[in-house]
Image (cartoon, grey):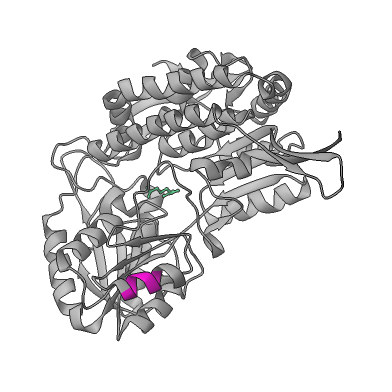
């Protein structure tokens, strides 16, 4: 089997490799991917540092052309890359193709942004002096991505980093190196100069740690667990390094008595269980008012009965497998915790066997949960949802906000008054009315508050905030 190698200073290197296993069929090896060392990482950082002066001054047309070529190639290969994604991560083929299209759109968006770089010219408060405000690229950006969006999250970090003139050392999640390798290969062939984008696949404890330890990494953008995020933060403060963190969520979806039942059930089923619940934007707490509670539980349970859990590549599958054995253990441990805490297992909770050996778990719904239970407070990152009964809108809002996280929050209601009030008073970075809490646009800001996020927003034109440093220049006329 060929080894997909790391890209360091424009060369493909590395002979030690790790197997990329398909969670829908653990007999299938998706590919062999290089296992980078600390030395590889240091070489990659040195290459990115050496490439920075020229790339930071590169023309915006050159950046536009490369980003556009990458976007176009990803779109042209969406079915093939989508299949690779479904095989390495386990989300269904339609979800995986959708995510691949999103990655392409992100490159197209930042190809456009490269042509719109601008500053401000402002008069000084002192006579005969002009002030110019511009954005400089930051330098060498360390990119660390999670396994749950193997192509979209790398795209939404790599595209803006390049657009604004930075160079990159990129470490994808160990479980899903395939899509990352593919986009690095695409960008390399699209004409990126040597050393501008370096790929170091490998372990977090080795590659990630070497990135954290290097004074030459000027900025780190990280999406992943809260625990690792905290380590990125403390190591970055040591080095006076800019950092951006996207971590967990325990996103509420409020369902009010006046909700359109079909809309509410659709939104809850989608954002609670699709992508196997493995999204930081998943609705893992359903907060339902008394008047609609029983009807909603009955309708959602009926819906869950119709969802097919099976191999991600199989037509008709709604929910693919859990990503790996470790995550499956976390999910089943939490199901046990929920039972012991006294929540009622209204649906699911069991492992399932399918034709191909994989990590299959039923979508699992706990009702009669309280917001204080661990299943309602801690991020599980699986298809496990707690449903909490509340009296009225006021209690629903207070419960929604009573969480250590603050990424996304939803409300299902036909009341303009409650929708408006919720948008204003939700303590989340993103609010959805009559829509799933997951599944966001690619051209607008993404991010949260409290324990979910740290630093500027990602995506859209707001991405410039992290990937650039503002300069204020004064000139005597
Ligand atoms: C989405 O819901 O469309 O890791 C995106 C995550 C998020 C991305 C969610 N950073 O789940």
Residue drawn at x 25%, y 59% is 267
Residue 475 in view (yes/no)? yes
Work out which quarter of the rendered image holds the C terminus and state it: top right
The residue furthest bottom is 391
Q: Which residue range is magenta in the image?
A: 417-422
Where residue 106 sits: x, y (%)? Answer: 43, 34
Q: Is residue 420 magenta?
A: yes
* Left-right relation of 351 to 169: left
Q: Residue at point 66% right, 31% down?
A: 38
Is 289 rendered above or below residue 73? below
Q: Is residue 425 above or below residue 470?
A: below
258 in the magenta segment? no
- Name the image quarter holding residue 90: top left
Q: Nearer the viewer, residue 339 or 223?
A: 223
The quarter of the rendered structure image containing the N terminus is top left
220 to the left or right of 187: right
- The secondary structure that dominates the magenta segment is helix
Give coordinates of residue 79: x percent, y percent: 26, 26
Percent x, y for residue 293? 20, 78
Instruction: Reply above or below: 229 against 466.
Output: below
- Return the residue found at the far front: 127
Q: Position of residue 381 (x, y in %)?
A: 39, 56
Q: Nearer the viewer, residue 327 or 179?
A: 179
x 42%, y 35%: residue: 176
Q: Is residue 402 above or below residue 43?
A: below
């Amino acid at each position: 089997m060929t080894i997909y190698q790391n890209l360091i200073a424009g060369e493909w290197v590395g002979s030690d490799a790790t197997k990329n296993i398909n969670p829908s069929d653990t007999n299938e090896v998706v590919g062999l991917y290089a296992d980078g060392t600390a030395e590889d990482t240091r070489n990659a950082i040195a290459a990115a540092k050496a490439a920075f002066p020229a790339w930071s001054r590169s023309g915006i047309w050159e950046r536009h052309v490369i980003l556009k070529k990458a976007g176009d190639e990803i779109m042209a290969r969406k079915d093939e890359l989508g299949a690779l994604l479904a095989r390495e991560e386990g989300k269904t083929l339609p979800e995986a193709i959708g995510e691949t299209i999103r990655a392409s759109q992100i490159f197209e968006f930042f190809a456009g942004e490269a042509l719109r770089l601008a500053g401000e010219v402002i008069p000084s408060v002192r006579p005969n002096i002009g002030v110019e405000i511009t954005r400089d690229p930051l330098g060498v950006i360390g990119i660390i991505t999670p396994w749950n969006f193997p192509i979209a999250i790398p795209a939404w970090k790599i595209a803006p980093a390049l657009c604004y003139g930075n160079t990159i050392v990129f470490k994808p999640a160990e479980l899903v190196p395939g899509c990352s390798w593919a986009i690095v290969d695409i960008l390399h062939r699209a004409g990126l100069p040597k050393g501008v984008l370096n790929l170091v696949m490998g372990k977090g404890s080795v590659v990630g740690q070497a990135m954290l330890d290097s004074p030459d990494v000027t900025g780190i953008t990280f999406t992943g667990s809260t625990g690792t995020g905290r380590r990125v933060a403390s190591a970055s403060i040591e080095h006076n390094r800019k950092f951006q963190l996207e971590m967990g969520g325990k996103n509420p979806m409020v369902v009010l008595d006046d909700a359109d039942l079909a809309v509410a059930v659709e939104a809850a089923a989608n954002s609670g269980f699709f992508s196997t619940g493995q999204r930081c934007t998943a609705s893992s707490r359903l907060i339902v008012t008394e008047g609609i509670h029983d009807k909603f539980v009955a309708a959602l349970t009926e819906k869950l009965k119709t969802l097919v859990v099976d191999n991600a590549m199989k037509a008709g599958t709604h929910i693919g497998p859990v990503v790996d054995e470790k995550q499956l253990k976390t999910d089943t441990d939490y199901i046990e915790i929920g039972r012991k805490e006294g929540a009622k297992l209204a649906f699911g909770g069991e492992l399932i066997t399918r034709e191909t050996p994989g990590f299959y778990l039923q979508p699992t719904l706990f009702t009669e949960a309280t917001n204080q239970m661990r299943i309602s407070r801690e991020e599980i990152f699986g298809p496990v949802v707690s449903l909490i009964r509340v009296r009225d809108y006021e209690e629903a809002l207070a419960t929604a906000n009573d969480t250590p996280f603050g990424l996304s929050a939803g409300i299902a209601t036909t009341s303009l008054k409650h929708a408006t009030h919720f948008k204003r008073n939700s303590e989340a970075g993103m609010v959805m009315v009559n829509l799933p809490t997951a599944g966001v646009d690619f051209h607008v800001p993404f991010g949260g508050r409290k324990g979910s996020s740290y630093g500027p927003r990602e995506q859209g034109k707001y991405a410039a905030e992290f990937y650039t440093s503002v300069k204020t220049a004064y000139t005597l006329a």
